[in-house]
Amino acid sequence: MDQSILFKPLKMGDVELPNRICMAALTRQRCESKDLVPTDMIIEYYGLRAEAGFILTECVPISQRSLAFPGEPGIFTKEQVEGWKKVVDKVHSKGGRIYAQVWHAGRASLSTLQDGLEIWGPSPIKIRGIHRRGLTEHEVPHEMTIEEIQEVIQQFRQAAENCKEAGFDGVELHGAHGYIIDQFLRDSSNQRKDEYGGSVENRSKLCLQVIDEFISVFGRGRVGIKISPVGRLNDQCDSDPLKLYTYLVKELEKKKIAFIEVKDDNDPANLFDFGYPSSKEQIPDLFDVFRPLFSGILLANNQYTPTTAIEGIEKGKFDAVTFGRLFISNPDLVERVRNGYELNTNWDVDTFYTKGIKGYLDYPLYSQQQQK
Ligand code: PHB
């Protein structure tokens, strides 16, 4: 396999990536205490992956109300910002680049984490089924008022300012997977009758307003977004995703943001089984649609391998790939690909969301494996 294209540097807005093997956001829930401050273990975990083209942090909550996963490090207190600063410094000291994935769970929030706060969403429609971590049913969210929407926009802005203070190289708005931005975008969760609901323009409004706030804090060259136009996670579907995301991506193009990360849902069987059409039926090839609309960097995400990444980049479908699970079990993924070493595909699903170093820091580096 000729992997040289993965090592062709890439200009992503204001930042030069030395390779195209980027690290996707990965929920790991490793904070031990309620303060949700990144710990030494978390600092080390990210530092070990500094060779990535760039690192996206796990989804980082912007407020108490936005929490959905126990132990996810936040970016809304001074102590959390100090903690992230240490993560960023560690990655920078090893020559890496790190962006925060900034996140509000909206109706997917978990009430046991909210300290009595009400759960907010665009419309009073609950996610069907059991919460991904909470072992309880989801709640019907409170339909946010215009003032409450403004409050959340301000929290996103403050979060971006906090990220800047922590020294992050940039920010990615989490606009995917059925969290608040996605909940406003798609019509399965947004049934509002006001200026934030109805037309594709109205449903895109929250997303684009938050992007504007991010741009005003970081500059357009350091801002990106993740989208999942046909993803079904958290009971999401749009009746016309082609129309909605064509509009959204055209607007993002006008704003000249640095990148769009696209969750490439290859889910013909509709595994989440909410009774929605299959993803492939709605949009057979997301990159065929978005590549002509967006001149910035397109990142592909979802179960790519180095081989499928090379294929897609060579065909001009996207520019780089964010790898998730492979980065869990191969902290030195970049070095392994560069040298053609075998990849460890024995990631341990049972330790993705547990506490402690097991399945977190204990994956051996290739050179250490070799010495055994
Ligand atoms: C999860 O932890 O299940 C999770 C978190 C963020 C996502 C998707 C899934 O974007």
Image: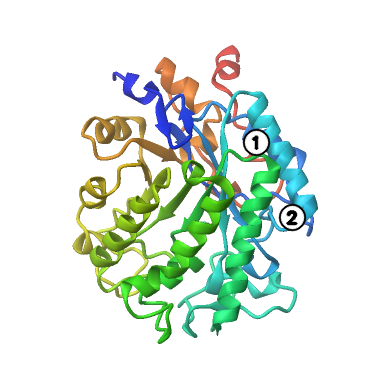
Asked whether, in this view, residue 52 is left or right of residue 337, the answer is: right
- Of 14 and 188, the residue lying toward us: 14
Q: Which of 267 and 291 is in front in this view?
A: 291
The disc placed on residue 173 is none
Closer to the chain start, of discs 1 and 2, is 2
Horizontal and vertical percent position of residue 8: 37, 22
Residue designated by label 1: 45
Quadrant in the picture for the N terminus: top left
Tell which of 91 and 225 is nearer to you. Answer: 225
The image's colouring method is rainbow
Residue 36 numbered tag: 2
Q: Which residue appears at 32% of the width and 72% of the height? A: 200
The image shows residue 37 at horizontal and vertical percentages of 76, 50
Q: Does dot 1 land on a helix, a strand or a loop?
A: helix
Residue visible at 60% across and 12% down in the picture: 371
From the viewer's perspective, tell me whether residue 189 is left or right of residue 96.
left
Write the residue at 47% across / 68% down: 206
Height in image: 283 above or below 203? Answer: above
How crowded pointer 2 is (Cα within 10 Å; few <14, some 14-19, many 20+) is rated as many
Any atom of ligand 1 within 8 Å of the CB at mark 1? no
Answer above or below: position of 28 versus 138.
Answer: above
The amino acid marked with disc number 1 is Tyr
